Image: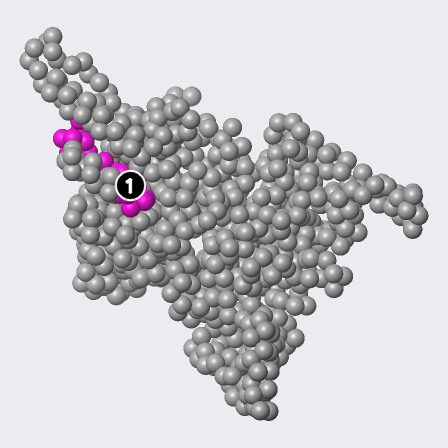
């Protein structure tokens, strides 16, 4: 009997799955579609087949399949991308057991993988998703010289294996006050930070040579840390360097010049003072949250920096960043809104959390715009996405619907 | 010769008066703007007339007939609303009670405020004109709070609001829940927290009774006790308690203690206030709330939601928003009320939560909180709807004096940030180190 029941259950489950599979076509009709591939489409349609965008265009020019599940929305944008977060690692509670974004036992630990610390069920993952965020670049936080790795993942899934876009997206380096130690611990100064990084990279160069040796006596044993740094020196993985002060940003460029790695500048509160240097280095900037606290390393931050960088032709992504206290996560939709109101405008600000974010993270072949062949990731809004009183009313991730903001109904 | 004396006299008078006295002598009419008076309907195109730091008239029409000598300022296409009130701020580099114990009723926060802190510049850039500056929440009672006007100030005295009885306006800051729980002499549990507070108030009651019994007899009077003197003000309802409290049961505990000792209380933060909204309403306690962009952090803020304002509104609770500045940035304070609307609050109540509700909570509603005749000329000039992200605060006026002008490069710097806008103080972040333990 038990076996019979179990059999029915399996059949029922199979039916559910197959129903899901036949509804593999999804269509979205919207008054305005911001494709981020040219001008917005008025009265547009997006069709998604098997989780990928199959068609996009003006109503009438795109055929809506008869058995497609149809959604209607006022405004549709690509699913939003948080260019640098710590969600899934920084749990919702400020208790050590719930905070996995920083390991303080050693200042240089590039071997720490984000995938080993990501909790897909942390409430903050769903929290950012309800505001349109479908992809996050998340992982080890600023706060140690080399705090560990980051990864890229969709905000929908039961485990870290679901929706993982890239296992190792970057190695996180901090050249800022937050990585400085007190007392007799290192690094205690800027000079020491740089010397420790240079030592680690030079040792990695030596290690790489010794690993290539044919002589078993001379061949180096496998070294976890150095293997990760070697992937940086081989330009397989970028270094994401969090630096706010102009002199710390200059330090990042000096280091990149010496070791020739791929650099992504992160935080960058004083990047508005370093426009020429950033252009010369040809690096993108993942800018601090617009509503970060403007003190300490960020005392010269500006809400206009995103517009200043954009106007200089520098690629800018917006981040939710990391907060040690509250809010436990910021929301890039809200942060980009402040940039929109301070010079970037709606579409400029939208770029920082869609296509330009995707370009910085080198995932623009899959996400960041609404184009045929890309992942079926969309966000629906009932008005200008950045207006305070607008709502995100839902998202599609690989064509699968997840609800947007839901508020208790007060009659 | 006579003209010389007149000239000299004029020079002496003008040279010897402050900018605010000048304002008292002139009449200014702000014409053409949409006016949101808070009390009364919004006016599509009206006139606000200011004299001597006070509002003398609010016209619901665009009638531009004025008394001779009236300075006319054209603000067509702009929006005027009352100066914004923050019922819970920590700007000015404040520090209240120290780590020596959990109760500091004798500590005055105004002894610890740096009026040159750039936080004040950012506050006026956000349209704020009145603040309740408080010590932190890491103590059961961290000290007295002070209500200030954001006038240009050389010392904190320049910002004070004086009460009719000659006292400096302010409240008393208390807290329960986890922030004040730590090692001895601080409480380790909620039960101990409440018992320490009860013990404190009972001792104050006894002190008060001894004073009353002694009457005018100097010999019978107990020695002066600074802390208890201020606690008597609390017991007599002359000093409101501003009580940090998050969890639903902590909120009820505050109401229980307020009922036992008869003090008047404003409930601050109330992250779980939505669970006990009817109980709060029944107690008649106003709430001062904030919206943070995500819930969590401390365990008692796990259930913080955007709808708290809407639920308290529905329950009929007097509710104001606060910045908790350093926790949220005063420059974007309008945003918080807009998020309240996003989650179900009415536009009117959300606007009141930035103005009139705060005025009532600080018991200054006869002076501030709305644009009405005889009230202080505290107002903000906006370039659009208060709840749009694209709207900028253009000018902020306190008692008729312009304290912020976005077109001024220095003010602009403080409004958006940039090189030189830097903070001169480390922020107050409650019990951050303590939480890491």
The residue lying at 53 percent from left, 69 percent from top is: B397
The residue lying at 25 percent from left, 47 percent from top is: A285
The one of B419 and B235 positioned closer to us in this rendering: B419
The residue lying at 47 percent from left, 66 percent from top is: B404
Residue B395 in the image: x percent, y percent? 47, 69
The one of B256 and B136 positioned closer to us in this rendering: B136
User: How many numbered circles are shown?
Assistant: 1
Q: Is residue A155 visible?
A: no
Q: Residue furthest front?
A: B1
Residue B214 in the image: x percent, y percent? 92, 46
Tell me: residue B246, above or below residue A144: below
Based on the picture, tell me whether residue A16 belongs to the magenta stretch.
no
Q: Which residues are magenta?
A: A229-249
Tell me: residue A118, above or below residue B113: above
The residue lying at 19 percent from left, 22 percent from top is: A203
Q: Quadrant of residue A66?
A: bottom left
Residue B254 in the image: x percent, y percent? 69, 43
Q: Residue furthest top?
A: A217
Q: Quadrant of residue A112?
A: top left
Residue B36 in the image: x percent, y percent? 53, 72
The one of B413 and A184 positioned closer to us in this rendering: A184
The answer for which chain carries disc 1 is A
Quadrant holding the N terminus of chain B? bottom right
Q: How is the image coloured?
A: one colour
Looking at the image, residue B235 sits to the left or right of residue A337; the answer is right
**Mark 1 Cα within 10 Å, few/some/many (few <14, many 20+)?**
many
Q: Secondary structure at mark 1?
A: helix
Which residue corresponds to mark 1? Answer: A248
Q: Is residue A109 visible?
A: yes
The one of A232 and A12 positioned closer to us in this rendering: A232
């Amino acid at each position: 009997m038990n076996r019979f029941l179990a059999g029915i259950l399996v059949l029922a489950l199979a039916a559910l799955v197959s129903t899901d599979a036949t509804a593999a076509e999804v269509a979205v009709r919207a008054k305005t579609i911001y494709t981020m591939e040219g001008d917005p489409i008025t009265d547009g349609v997006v069709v998604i087949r098997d989780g990928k965008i199959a068609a996009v265009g003006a109503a009438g020019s795109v055929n809506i399949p008869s058995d497609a599940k149809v959604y209607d929305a006022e405004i549709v944008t690509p699913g939003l991308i948080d260019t640098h977060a710590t969600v899934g690692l920084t749990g919702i509670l400020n208790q050590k057991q719930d905070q996995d974004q920083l390991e303080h036992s050693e200042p240089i630990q590039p071997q720490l993988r984000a995938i080993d610390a990501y909790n897909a069920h942390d409430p903050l993952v769903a929290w950012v998703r309800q505001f349109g965020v479908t992809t996050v670049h998340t992982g080890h936080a600023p706060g140690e010289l080399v705090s560990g790795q980051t990864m890229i993942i969709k905000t929908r899934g039961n485990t870290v294996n679901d929706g993982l876009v890239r296992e190792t997206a970057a190695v996180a380096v901090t050249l800022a006050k937050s990585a400085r130690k007190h007392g007799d611990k290192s690094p205690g100064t800027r000079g020491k930070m740089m010397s420790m990084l240079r030592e680690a990279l030079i040792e990695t160069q030596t290690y790489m040579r010794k690993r290539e040796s044919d002589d078993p006596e001379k061949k180096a044993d496998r070294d976890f840390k150095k293997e990760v740094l070697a992937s940086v020196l081989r330009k397989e993985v970028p270094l994401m360097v969090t630096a706010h002060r102009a002199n710390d940003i200059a330090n990042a460029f000096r280091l990149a010049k010496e070791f020739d790695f791929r650099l992504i500048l992160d935080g960058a509160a004083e990047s508005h003072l370093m426009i020429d240097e950033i252009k010369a280095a040809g690096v993108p900037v993942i800018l601090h949250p617009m509503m970060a606290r403007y003190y300490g390393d960020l005392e010269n931050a500006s809400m206009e920096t995103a517009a200043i960088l954009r106007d200089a032709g520098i690629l800018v992504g917006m981040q939710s960043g990391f907060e040690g206290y509250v809010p436990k996560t910021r929301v890039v939709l809200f942060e980009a809104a402040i940039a929109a109101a301070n010079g970037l405008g709606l579409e400029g600000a939208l770029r920082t959390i869609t296509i330009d974010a995707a370009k910085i993270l080198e995932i623009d072949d899959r996400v960041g715009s609404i184009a045929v062949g890309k992942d079926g990731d969309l966000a629906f809004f009932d008005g200008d996405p950045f207006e305070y009183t607008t709502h995100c009313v839902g998202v599609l991730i690989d064509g699968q619907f997840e609800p947007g903001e839901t508020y208790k109904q007060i009659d | 010769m006579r003209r010389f004396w007149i000239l000299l006299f004029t020079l002496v008078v003008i040279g010897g008066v402050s900018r605010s006295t000048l304002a008292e002598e002139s009449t200014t009419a702000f014409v053409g703007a949409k006016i949101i008076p808070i009390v009364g309907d919004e006016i599509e195109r009206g006139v606000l007339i200011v004299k001597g730091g006070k509002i003398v008239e609010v016209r619901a029409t665009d009638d531009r007939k004025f008394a001779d000598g009236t300075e006319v300022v054209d603000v067509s296409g702009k929006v005027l609303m009352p100066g914004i009130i923050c019922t819970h701020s920590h700007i000015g580099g404040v520090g209240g009670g120290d780590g020596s114990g959990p109760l500091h009723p004798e500590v005055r926060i105004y002894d610890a405020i740096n009026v040159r802190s750039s936080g004040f510049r950012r506050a006026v850039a956000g349209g704020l004109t009145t603040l309740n500056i408080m010590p932190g929440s890491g103590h059961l009672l961290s000290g007295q709070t002070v209500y200030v006007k954001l006038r240009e100030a050389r010392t904190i005295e320049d910002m004070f609001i004086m009460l009719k009885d000659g006292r400096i306006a302010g409240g008393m800051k208390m807290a329960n829940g986890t922030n004040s729980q730590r090692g001895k002499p601080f409480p380790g549990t909620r039960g101990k927290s409440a018992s320490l507070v009860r013990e404190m108030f009972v001792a104050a009651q006894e002190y008060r009774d001894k004073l009353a019994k002694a009457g005018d007899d100097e010999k019978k009077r107990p020695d002066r006790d600074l802390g208890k003197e201020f606690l008597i003000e609390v017991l007599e309802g002359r000093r409101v308690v501003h009580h940090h409290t998050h969890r639903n049961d902590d909120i009820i505990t505050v109401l229980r203690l307020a009922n036992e000792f008869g003090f008047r209380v404003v409930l601050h933060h109330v992250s779980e206030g939505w669970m006990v909204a009817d109980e709060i309403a029944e107690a008649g306690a106003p709430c001062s709330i904030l919206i943070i962009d995500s819930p969590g952090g401390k365990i008692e803020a796990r259930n913080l939601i955007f709808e708290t304002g809407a639920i308290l509104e529905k329950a009929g609770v007097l509710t104001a928003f606060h910045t908790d500045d350093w926790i949220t940035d005063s420059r974007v304070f309008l945003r918080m009320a807009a998020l309240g609307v996003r989650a179900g609050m009415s536009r009117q109540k959300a606007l009141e939560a930035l103005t009139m509700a705060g005025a009532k909570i600080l018991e200054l509603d006869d002076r501030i909180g709305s644009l009405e005749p005889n009230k202080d000329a505290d107002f903000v000039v906006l370039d659009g709807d208060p709840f749009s992200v694209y709207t900028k605060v253009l000018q902020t006026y306190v008692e008729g004096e312009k304290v912020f002008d976005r077109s001024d490069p220095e003010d602009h710097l403080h409004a958006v940030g940039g090189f030189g806008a830097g903070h001169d103080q480390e922020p107050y972040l409650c019990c951050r180190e303590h939480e890491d333990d």
